[in-house]
Amino acid sequence: MALNTELVHIAQKAQKAARRMSEVSSDLKNRVLVEMARSLLKEKRLILEENGKDLASVKKKGLPQAMIERLCLDDRRIKGMADSLFEISKLNDPVGEEIKAWKRPNGLMIHKVRVPIGAILIIYESRPNVTSDCIGLCLKSGNAVILRGGSEALRSNLAIYRILEKVARKYKLPEGLISIVDTTDRAAVNLLLKMNDHIDLVIPRGGEGLIREVTKNSSIPVIKHYKGICHVYVDEAANLNMAEEICFNAKVQRPGVCNAMETLLVHKDVAVRFLPHMAKRFKEAGVELRGCPITRRILKGIKKATEKDWVTEYLGLILSIRVVESLGEAIEHINDYGSHHSDTIVTDDYSNAMRFLNLVDSACVYVNASTRFTDGYQFGMGAEIGISTDKLHARGPMALEELTTYKYMIFGEGQIRK
C-alpha cells in the first residue's frame, strides 16, 4: 500500500508540473538544457563510478553481452549524452507552433496549435543514456517525465537523474517535472500502468518481453516497437563495393541495437559474385552466418537458416542470408518477416529504388545507406525518446514533434450557432 501511495504522489506531481510548463519560456528551457549538458561533463567521474558498480553487478549475474554493451558508459558516451542536450537546446521549440489556420464563412478563426502531451512514463532497460535523452526531450517539448529504468542500471540512472534534476531545481522549474522511480520492486511498473488518471502516455524501451508486458497491462496509451528485424537487400543493379560497405556497417558496427541488420537478402544474379568476399569479411569480424539452400551452395559449411531465423532479432554477431529471385520476392520477404523498423535497398536502378521505398511497409526505408542511421540524433532531432513501429500516433524515431499533440484555438466576435 505504501508503494502505491508513493507512486500516486509521483504521478500527481508530474501531472501538475506538466500543466504549469505552458508558462515556461523557450529561452528558459534552452538555458536549463545547456547547463544540464555542462553538468554531465562536469560530473563525469561520478557517473562512471556508479556505472562501474552496475557493470560489476551484471557481470556477476552472467547477463547477455548485448545488455552489458548497452549498459556500459565511457567518456565518449557521456560526451554523446551532453552533445544531445546541447543539440536539443538549439532545436525549434514545437510548443505553440501553428500547424494550420483558417477562417470560416461565419467569421470564426480556427487555429490548430501544437501542445505538450502531458505526463509521460518511460519504462526502459539497460541504457543509461535514455535517462538524459528523455529528460532533455520531455523538458523541451513541455512534458513531465517519470523514469523507470531497469534494476541493472539503477546506480547509473540515479546518478544522471540527480545531476539533471539539480539543475531543474536551480532554475525553479515546476516540482515533479522530472522524477525517477528508484525502487527495484517489479510491482511498481504494474501500479504505474494503471494510473491513467494522471499519466497520459507510456513509452517502453527494451526487449520484446518488456514491451509486450507493458502493452498487455497498461491502461494508458502505449507507443512501442517490439523488435528490430532489419534487412539489407542487395539488388541486381547494386554497386557491389558499396553494398559490401553498407552490409558490413549495418551488421558489425554495433550489433546489439535495434537498427542493426539481422537478415541480408541478395538477388540471385549477383549472389555468386557478392557473397564469398562479403562472407569472408563477416567471418573475420566473428559473425556467424546462417543461409538458405542457395546461400549454402555458394558458402560451403555455413549453418542452415530455419524459418525461425527470419523472425529472430539476434542483437549479436549472427546473420541470416537469403538469395531471392527478384526485387518483388525481397519486398515480400521483408513485409512478411520484418518488424517494420528499418530496411535498405542497395541499387543503382532508380525504378527499383522507388518501388522498394513505396512497397516496403517499414518506418524507415533507405536507398544506398546503412540501417544504422535510424536514430534521432542521426536524423537531426537532437536525440530520440524511442523508435516507434506503430502507425499511430508516431512512427520511426520520436523526438520533439512526436512528443506533442495539438488543440484547436478558436477566436470569435460573438458568433452563436443557429
Image: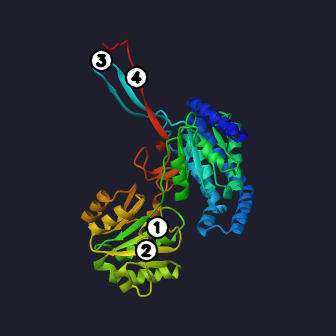
Name the image quarter holding residue 146.
Answer: top right
Which label's residue is closer to the chain start, 4 or 2? 2
Mark 1 or 3: the one toward you: 1
| Callout 2 secondary element | strand
> Residue 254 at x, y = what percent?
53, 67
Q: Residue at x 27, y 61 (%)?
A: 355
Outermost residue on the front side: it is 1
Q: Earlier in the sequence, mark 4 or mark 1?
A: 1
For label 1, the crowd category at 10 Å Cα-Cα, with few meaning under 14, some 14 to 19 and many 20 or more, is: some
Determine the residue located farthest toward the left in the rendered image: 351
User: According to the image, label 2 marks what residue?
Assistant: 320
Q: Secondary structure at mark 3?
A: loop
Write the residue at 66% across / 61% down: 73
Disc 3/disc 4 C-alpha distance (Å): 12 Å
Q: Nearer the viewer, mark 2 or mark 3?
A: 2
In the picture of the structure, the residue carrying the numbered disc 4 is: 410
Q: Pointer 3: what residue?
A: 106
Tell me how far mark 2 sits from mark 3, CA to CA. Answer: 62 Å
Residue at the spot 61% in from the left edge and 55% down from the top edge:
129
The residue identified by callout 1 is: 312
Say left or right for 326 vs 14.
left
Calculate the distance from the C-alpha at mark 4 to the C-alpha at mark 1: 50 Å
Task: Kindly report which numbered mark, 4 or 2, lies closer to the viewer in this rendering.
Answer: 2
Query: Which of the marked residues, 2 or 1, is nearer the chain's N terminus?
Result: 1
Check if mark 2's residue and mark 1's residue have beta carbons within 8 Å. Answer: yes
Q: Which mark is residue 416?
A: none
| Residue 217 shows in this picture | yes
User: Residue 47 is drawn in which quadrant?
Assistant: bottom right
Cα distance between the residues tagged 2 and 1? 9 Å
- Residue 63 at what x, y percent from top left? 64, 67
